[in-house]
């Protein structure tokens, strides 16, 4: 007899939550994993590894099956997400060396800048990889700017580039953390500087051997891309990195609990070098890559716990995704290949990081906002470049004509109020080959680029012939049906041309 009453109460609560939070500005947390594939977590079908914390976002929120990073590598995906503009429109936005100048112009509206204007406290914690400092790159021993603080973040605690690139130090706001002025940092991507051992000359000093590249300066027993000298006290310990950055992320949440805040939390996991904390080592049975997935899952759990403890879960949108698809051997001999077993990092998708095939950019994408987003699964087409316009809509911000030119407002799809997102997806492969997904068709433009990345053993999807796949019948892009479907091909070529010329 209480059932109708309970039902009514739930309904009232739900409606109340919707009304209040529609008027408020919810906190926004983006947890952005690195190189995590479509099939790498159990909520997307992995059976050989369990990711209970990431899965919690799936059961409590919306799990998107057709959401995409804009690019098959890190720098351009991040560039697009933060600027609302496809990276391939701007020269020099490919994988950035560790001494690159800031790639995002300081005079444009960015995602964090827009939210800052909406009254948010904004932070980036974790991997940056978007360049720092003026033309010519940064002087690591001074105040480093422009950087995150000049493009709309109130707080930053970052790895300047990647885990496998020098300088291997943390930067907080405009300074390198724990830098001893008597031991200045110098960095070179051209030639060896200083006399510190390198992976090439002193392999006997290594904890983990490189498989390709990655044989320059040794830091913490791991040889990196690029040379560095100095900054000894400031150098990170890879095994502690997840703990260090997770702490910083949670501190930021705690300090800004009255909200609204925007946290862009970019993990180093599961990028190389995969050096998880000892409490995860050996736990996946899949080698360092699997252990790094467990560490990533732990990270997500810590963030969710922190939100629960502060009673913020209902006031916070948590979005989880990855910057590009999976790769096994990305330059270190960490047994990712030999210990893979039956795990399928990309699920049924073809290709991987660097590729033009689906696995390169179709990634896990989960959005949770308890009380507002009804849990479920969505096949809406979403690109990470759309977060800008969607969050502008959510927070009542009007964008200028020049702002976020490639970003569509897909807020209704993100919140589960609409089945459809954008009309098409444009993805960029390593060598800039573009592809288009629309109405379950996938078109890859002709390219003379290499077919295989031999180092990583990834099919790159380049072909001098146009490729067309029917994703509904052929999710693994096995049969090129371009010749049999000239009309579809023509129409998709026209759409891509239009987007390019926009
Ligand atoms: C490649 C690196 C790879 C990785 C990648 C960037 C070599 C041989 N390979 O050039 O290890 O660092 O760049 O990855 O150096 S990303 O996810 O940050 O885009
Ligand atoms: Ca990446």
Image: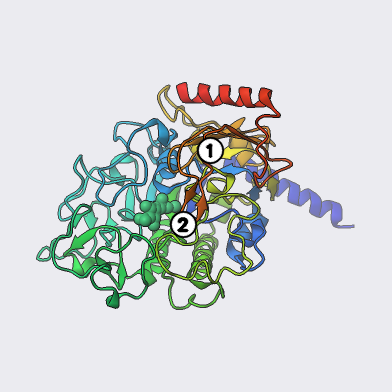
> Closer to us: mark 1 or mark 2?
1
Does 299 appear above or below 493? below
Q: Is residue 425 visible?
A: yes
- In this picture, residue 21 sits left or right of residue 161: right
**Residue sitting nearer the eye, 71 or 123:** 71
Count of numbered labels shown in the rendering: 2
- The percent coordinates of residue 412 (x first, y second) are 63, 36
Percent position of residue 316, x then y: 54, 50
Q: Which mark is residue 463?
A: 1
Q: Is mark 2 within 8 Å of ligand 1?
A: yes
Query: Vertical placement of 149 versus 170: above or below?
Result: above
Residue 122 - label: none
Q: For the point 52% across and 34% down, which residue is it? A: 464
Is 15 placed above or below 207 here? Answer: above
* Frontmost residue, 342 versus 180: 342
Residue 483 appears at what percent x and percent y? 67, 29
Task: Give the position of the N terminus as an image quadrant.
Answer: bottom right
Within 10 Å of disc 1 (Cα), the crowding (few <14, some 14-19, many 20+) is some
Question: What residue is shown with label 2?
Answer: 456
Q: How is the image coloured?
A: rainbow
Q: Secondary structure at mark 1?
A: loop
Q: Residues within 10 Å of mark 2 (few under 14, many from 20)?
A: some
Q: In the depicted view, which residue is nearer to us: 198 or 43?
A: 198
Q: Residue furthest right?
A: 1
Residue 14 is left or right of residue 229, and the answer is right
């Amino acid at each position: 007899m209480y059932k109708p009453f309970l039902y009514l109460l739930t309904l009232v609560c739900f409606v109340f939550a919707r009304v209040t939070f529609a008027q408020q500005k919810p906190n926004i947390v983006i947890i952005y994993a690195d190189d995590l594939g479509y099939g790498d977590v159990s909520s997307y079908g992995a059976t050989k590894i369990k990711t209970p914390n990431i899965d919690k976002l799936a059961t409590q929120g919306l799990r998107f099956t057709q959401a995409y990073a804009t690019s098959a590598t890190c720098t351009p995906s991040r560039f697009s997400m933060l600027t609302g503009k496809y990276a391939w429109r701007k020269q020099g936005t490919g994988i950035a060396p560790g001494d690159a100048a800031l790639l995002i112009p300081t005079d444009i509206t960015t995602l964090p800048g827009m939210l800052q204007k909406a009254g948010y406290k904004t932070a980036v914690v974790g991997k940056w990889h978007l360049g720092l400092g003026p033309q010519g790159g940064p002087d690591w021993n001074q105040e480093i700017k422009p950087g995150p603080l000049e493009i709309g973040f109130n707080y930053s605690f970052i790895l300047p580039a990647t885990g496998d690139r020098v300088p291997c130090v943390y930067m907080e706001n405009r300074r390198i953390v724990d830098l001893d002025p008597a031991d200045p940092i110098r960095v070179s991507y051209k030639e060896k500087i200083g006399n510190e051992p390198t992976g090439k000359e002193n392999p006997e000093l290594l904890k983990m051997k490189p498989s390709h590249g990655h044989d320059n300066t040794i830091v913490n027993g791991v040889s990196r891309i690029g040379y560095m000298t100095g900054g000894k006290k400031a150098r990170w310990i890879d095994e502690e990195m997840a703990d260090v950055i997770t702490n910083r992320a949670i501190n930021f949440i705690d300090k800004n609990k009255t909200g609204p805040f925007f946290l862009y939390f970019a993990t180093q996991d599961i990028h190389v070098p995969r050096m998880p904390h000892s409490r995860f080592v050996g736990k996946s049975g899949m080698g360092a890559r699997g252990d790094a997935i467990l560490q990533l899952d732990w990270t997500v759990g810590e963030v969710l716990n922190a939100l629960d403890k502060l009673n913020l879960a209902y006031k916070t949108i948590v979005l989880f995704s990855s910057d590009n698809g999976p790769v096994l051997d990305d330059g270190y001999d960490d047994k990712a290949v030999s210990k893979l077993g039956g795990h399928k990092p990309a699920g049924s998708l073809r290709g991987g990081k660097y590729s033009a095939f689906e696995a390169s950019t179709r990634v896990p994408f989960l959005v949770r906002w308890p009380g507002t987003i009804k849990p479920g699964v969505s096949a809406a087409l979403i690109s990470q470049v759309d977060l800008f316009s969607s969050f502008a809509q959510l927070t009542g911000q009007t964008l200028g004509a020049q702002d976020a030119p490639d970003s569509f407002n897909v807020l209704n799809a993100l919140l589960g109020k609409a089945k459809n997102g954008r009309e098409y997806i444009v993805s960029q492969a390593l060598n800039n080959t573009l592809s288009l997904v629309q109405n379950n068709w996938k078109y890859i433009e002709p390219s003379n680029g290499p077919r295989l990345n031999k180092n990583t053993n990834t099919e790159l999807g380049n072909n001098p012939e146009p490729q067309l796949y029917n994703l509904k019948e052929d999710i693994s892009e096995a049969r090129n049906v371009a010749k049999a479907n000239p009309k579809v091909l023509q129409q998709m070529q026209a759409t891509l041309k239009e987007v390019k010329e926009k």
